[in-house]
Amino acid sequence: MNNVNKKKSYSFLSDTEPTKEQLDDLMLAVLEDVKERAAKAEAKYKALQATALEQAQEMWQKKLKKRCQYLNLHSSSLQDQMALEKHHLLHKF
């Protein structure tokens, strides 16, 4: 099972019908193989999901940071404009 490309052989060596015990052993081997494959597939799926989640979080953090920088830039210029207008209004009278 260490080799990913390794194929399981479920064939019998003789030309006679398999015994009940041989069939039971075969079914247990198939079951074990299926469980191992399912565990590997689940681990791979979870890793892919974790990667996708991490990428999505990074993307949204960048968007949020960019938006905050934009708002801070415009908010400071707005505050400067308001202060300038206030200054002009105070000095008019």
Image (cartoon, rainbow, N blue to C red):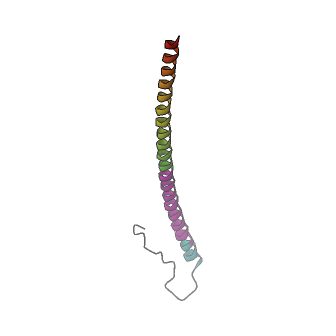
Q: Front-most of 5 and 77?
A: 77
Q: Quadrant of the N terminus?
A: bottom left
Q: Residue furthest front?
A: 92
The spot of residue 56 in percent (x, y) is: 51, 48
Query: What residue appears at the point 46 percent right and 33 percent down from the top-left corner?
Result: 73
Magenta range is: 27-52
Q: Position of residue 5 (x, y in %)?
A: 43, 73
Residue 46's place in the image compared with 90, above or below, is: below
**Which residue is most to the bottom?**
15
Residue sitting farthest toward the top: 93
Q: Report the front residue among 21 and 71.
A: 71
Taking the image as shown, residue 92 lies to the left or right of residue 3, namely right
The relative height of residue 49 versus residue 1 in the rendered view (above or below) is above
| Picture quadrant where residue 21 is located | bottom right
Count of numbered circles on the image: 0
List x then y, in percent, for residue 13: 49, 84
Q: Is residue 21 magenta?
A: no
Asked if residue 47 is positioned above or below residue 65 in the image, the reply reads below
Q: What's the residue at 48%, 21% (across, down)? A: 84
Secondary structure, magenta segment, majority class: helix
State the residue at coordinates (52%, 66%).
Answer: 32
Q: Tell me if residue 28 is in the magenta stretch.
A: yes
In the displayed structure, would residue 27 be above or below residue 62? below
Residue 20, horizontal then vertical, whole percent: 59, 76
Rendered residue at 43%/73% (across/down) = 6
